[in-house]
Image (cartoon, rainbow, N blue to C red):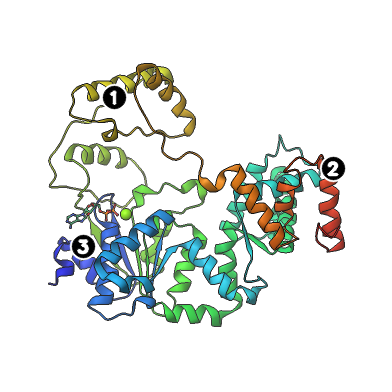
Amino acid sequence: MTALTDTLNDAQRRAVEVPGGPLMILAGPGSGKTRVITHRIAYLVQERGVPPWRILAVTFTNKAAREMRDRIEALLGDRASSLTMGTFHAICARLLRREGEAIGLTRDFVIYDTDDQMSLVRTIEAELDIDQKRFTPRSILSAISSAKNERRGAAAYAGGADNYFEEIVGRVYERYEAALRRSGAVDFDDLLGRTLELFETHPEIQQQYAERYLFTLVDEFQDTNLVQYQLARALSSAHHNLTVVGDPDQSIYSWRAADVRNLLDFERDFPGATTVLLEQNYRSTGHILRVAHAVIAKADGRPEKSLWTTNPDGERVVEYEATYGEEEALFIAGEVNRLLRGARYRTSDIAIMYRTNAQSRAIEEAFIAQGVRYRIVGGTRFYDRREVRDLIAYLRIVHNEYDTVAFDRIVNIPTRGIGAKSVGDLVSASADLGISILAV
Ligand SMILES: Nc1ncnc2c1ncn2[C@@H]1O[C@H](COP(=O)(O)OP(=O)(O)O)[C@@H](O)[C@H]1O
Ligand SMILES: [Mg+2]
């Protein structure tokens, strides 16, 4: 036993020390899944002599990537800096900047975010005279995104449409793709889809990356969608050392085509895979674990696994059923005040979670009325602030005169009195003539 694995329980240590091949680590929250990934990476480098640049670690959010890098740095020091680590999107973006020319992307391609996509779809709907109240840009984009995550291109989608909504989506989708290509741009889903396309049309490029990455590790694998699953397989296709870590009970992204089946099908797709279950929980009290188990045990199609802990039972879980939102808010504010009065807890010890942002209003009102101080986590991110986005749009136009979405954003900032009709005419003239908007 080495110092590195000293701090692991038996199941964790087994997972960390698996020599190679497909490996699936299945566990509940707080059982040390991320700890196993970070220790496995450190173990591979330190004990097995794997060069850090030959390891690829994928996380689900940028925040998780930073956290993982910090945790590995603590174990490996400077050697951690040459690991490839990031979200699927970040890793694919980097790969496409380097190799995208093979599929017609320039090195400095623009990545459209949600706002850019919305504005593009709005313009297309206006061009096609589609009623945007009935077919909201959001619903169309969401259909396009799902199609991309299932790898259905615009032509296939339009051809296979079997109701009116899909027909509308198909028409917008085709123009949307054409506009992206004209602007030399990709959207978030394309980062993944076009990387797969690159691999399929240029097997030698896939081979080069698959050869490079001796080990591929994916955290939060339950949240990967079909395209991400295929990417993970492609990137580990030379050495078959794919480690996935996930919790089938925890898939929070099913609304965006994440497919928990990936996790459940892993054993079928990777014959000979090693499976390790982590069942000891370090984060929660006994009572909380038992309540969570009682709820989740009712879900269909989940592999049977149960968590245990050596933590104390702790306080009992209280369930309170309110009849309407305001009553719920009053109850919460009352409980918070009760806890604070005891002088044992401060406001920073208390968290309120809700399912949708709209629910915060009633709770905030109750807090204001009862003088409870609170802070909303989340809110508008820096890059979503209007002035920041306007400035970026100007920079994009300077960088790429064909960027119609950026043009659309800034044409009237500051106000220039150019109407939507004129903008539409300019954009279509630019597309028809094949010259930039500024040239029109
Ligand atoms: N073997 C262990 N000994 C002590 N603490 C542990 C052990 N395994 C995990 N933990 C602690 O449990 C918590 C959850 O670990 P983490 O890896 O984030 O779990 P998960 O990714 O499964 O949610 C962390 O604080 C971690 O340090
Ligand atoms: Mg984790």
Compared with 204, 399 (above or below) is above
Where on the picture, by quarter, is residue 215? bottom left
Question: Upstream in the sequence, badge 1 or badge 3?
Answer: 3
Q: Is 158 positioned to the left or the right of 435 in the image?
A: left
At 34% from the left and 71% from the top, the residue drawn is 22
Q: Which element carries disc 2, helix, strand or loop? A: helix
Amino acid carrying mark 3 in the image = Gln
Which quadrant of the figure shows ligand 1? bottom left
**Which mark is nearer the camera, 2 or 3?**
2
| Cα gap from disc 1 to disc 3, whole angstroms | 38 Å
Badge 3: few (under 14), some or many (20 or more) residues near its Cα, within 10 Å?
Answer: many
Image mark for residue 421: 2
Q: Nearer the viewer, residue 112 or 369?
A: 369
Mark 3: secondary structure: helix
Position in image of residue 425 (x %, y %): 86, 49
Residue 336, numbered label: 1
Q: Quadrant of residue 6?
A: bottom left
Q: Residue at x 65, y 70 (%)?
A: 105
Q: Is mark 2 within 8 Å of ligand 2?
A: no
Q: Is residue 385 visible?
A: yes
Residue 398 quadrant: bottom right
Mark 2 or mark 1: name the one nearer the start of the chain. 1
**Quadrant the C terminus occupies:** bottom right
Work out how far the residue at label 2 is from the one at label 1, CA to CA, in angstroms.
Answer: 54 Å
Where residue 314 appears, x then y in whole percent?
Answer: 15, 36
Q: Mark number for residue 12? A: 3
Residue at mark 3: C-beta within 8 A of ligand 1:
yes
